Image: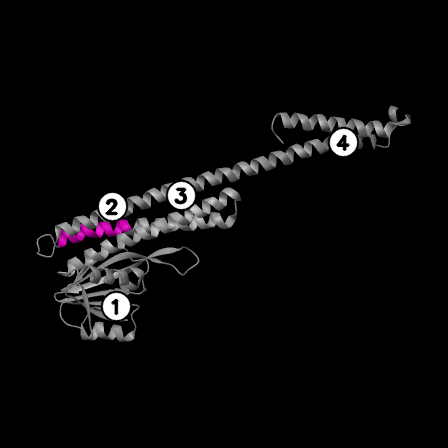
């Protein structure tokens, strides 16, 4: 699906492409590929790079065409992690600006609505790229707040009862934070490259560039804080689980030793040999009382040393 957006005090959607118009393509189909490759003559190799789910942020030029790949966050429909990052490619050439993403994300639609609501004018292709990066940092922070809330809920459940499901949930959230950290860092590096490429041109807006850098640093710092906190939480619960296992094993060992005493006495007096107490009329009761007495002494001693 593609839309044609012209920057006229906010994005105005047009029925067809015109020069200096932003072509936004999400989940491209055959008709979109035909339009981009045949009508606009976009190199087909660019789409293969954008389609790679693991593609890192980078920029490259082929003739007059330039491909800039960024990573943006989105909610995941998979069971593995709640949030992922996906590549978005921004293809530019003179009066042509195209963005291609193989996923439908909240970020792009929200970005377009924000530009319209604020009546912001996108002056050139670099402005568009920087504002998309700025929007991605904003959405990273939104999803990070959601992750922090989910971590808090999982911690409350773990405090009541340690279950594998809650621990696995924390592990998946930590995996998401790793994805976020890598993607944000890649976008930061990409800003530095774009700054060097457009440094001597009229495209570079220093004020906007500084705002984007600050927002990305805030997102990166927040990711690191949450990641460190979650790592400490996971380590703490791992220690708690280990201590619980040790306590259970200690109780089981104490119980085994306590029950071993009457078993040992019964084994001695169950042997088929003559014993002095064997002819005593109350021998059985004495043996039972002796077993109970020794087991009780052992139990009291274990309680004293806090093994029970």
Query: What residue would you read off at disc 4?
Result: 262
Residue lying at 26% horizontally and 73% vertically, measured from the top left: 32
Query: What residue would you read off at disc 1?
Result: 25
Query: What residue would you read off at disc 3?
Result: 230
Please name whichever residue, 259 or 9, is drawn nearer the observer in this view of the structure. 9
Find the distance from the CA under tag 1 to the CA under tag 3: 37 Å
Find the distance from the CA under tag 2 to the CA under tag 3: 20 Å
Look at the magenta stretch and give its main secondary structure: helix
Question: Left or right of 296: which side holds 234?
Answer: left
Q: How is the image coloured?
A: one colour
* Label 1 or label 2, whichever comes before in sequence order: 1
* Label 2 or label 3, whichever comes before in sequence order: 2
- Helix, strand or loop under label 3: helix
Find the distance from the CA under tag 4 to the CA under tag 1: 80 Å
Mark 4 or mark 1, which is nearer to you? 1
Task: Give the magenta part as a residue range.
Answer: 184-197
x and y, in percent, of residue 92 in the image: 17, 64
* Label 4 or label 2, whichever comes before in sequence order: 2
For residue 187: magenta? Answer: yes
x and y, in percent, of residue 213 in the image: 20, 48
Q: Which mark is residue 217?
A: 2
x and y, in percent, of residue 42 in the image: 20, 69
């Amino acid at each position: 699906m593609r839309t044609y957006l012209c920057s006229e005090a906010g994005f105005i959607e047009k029925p067809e492409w015109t020069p200096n118009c932003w072509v936004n393509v999400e989940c491209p189909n055959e008709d979109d590929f035909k339009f981009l490759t045949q009508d606009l003559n976009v190199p087909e190799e660019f789409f293969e790079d954008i389609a790679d789910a693991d593609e890192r942020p980078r920029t490259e030029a082929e003739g007059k065409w330039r491909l800039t790949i960024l990573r943006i966050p989105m909610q995941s429909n998979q069971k593995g992690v709640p949030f992922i990052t996906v590549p978005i490619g921004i293809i530019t050439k003179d009066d042509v600006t195209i963005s291609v993403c193989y996923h439908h994300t909240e970020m792009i639609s929200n970005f377009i609505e924000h530009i319209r609501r604020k009546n912001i004018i996108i002056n050139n292709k670099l402005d568009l790229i920087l504002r998309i990066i700025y929007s991605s940092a904003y959405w990273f922070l939104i999803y990070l707040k959601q992750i922090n809330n989910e971590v808090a809920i999982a911690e409350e459940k773990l405090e009541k009862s340690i279950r594998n499901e809650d621990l696995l949930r924390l592990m998946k959230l930590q995996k998401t934070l790793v994805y976020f950290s890598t993607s944000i860092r890649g976008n930061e590096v990409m800003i530095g490259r774009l700054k060097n490429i457009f440094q001597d041109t009229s495209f570079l807006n220093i004020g906007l560039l500084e705002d984007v850098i600050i927002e990305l640093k805030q997102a990166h710092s927040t990711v690191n804080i949450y990641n460190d906190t979650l790592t400490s939480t996971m380590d703490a619960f791992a220690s708690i689980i280990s201590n619980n296992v040790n306590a259970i094993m200690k109780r089981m060992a104490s119980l085994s030793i306590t029950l071993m005493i009457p078993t040992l006495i019964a084994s001695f007096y169950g042997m088929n040999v003559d014993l002095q107490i064997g002819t005593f009329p109350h021998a059985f009761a004495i043996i039972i009382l002796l077993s109970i007495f020794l087991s009780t002494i052992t139990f009291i001693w274990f309680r004293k040393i806090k093994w029970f």
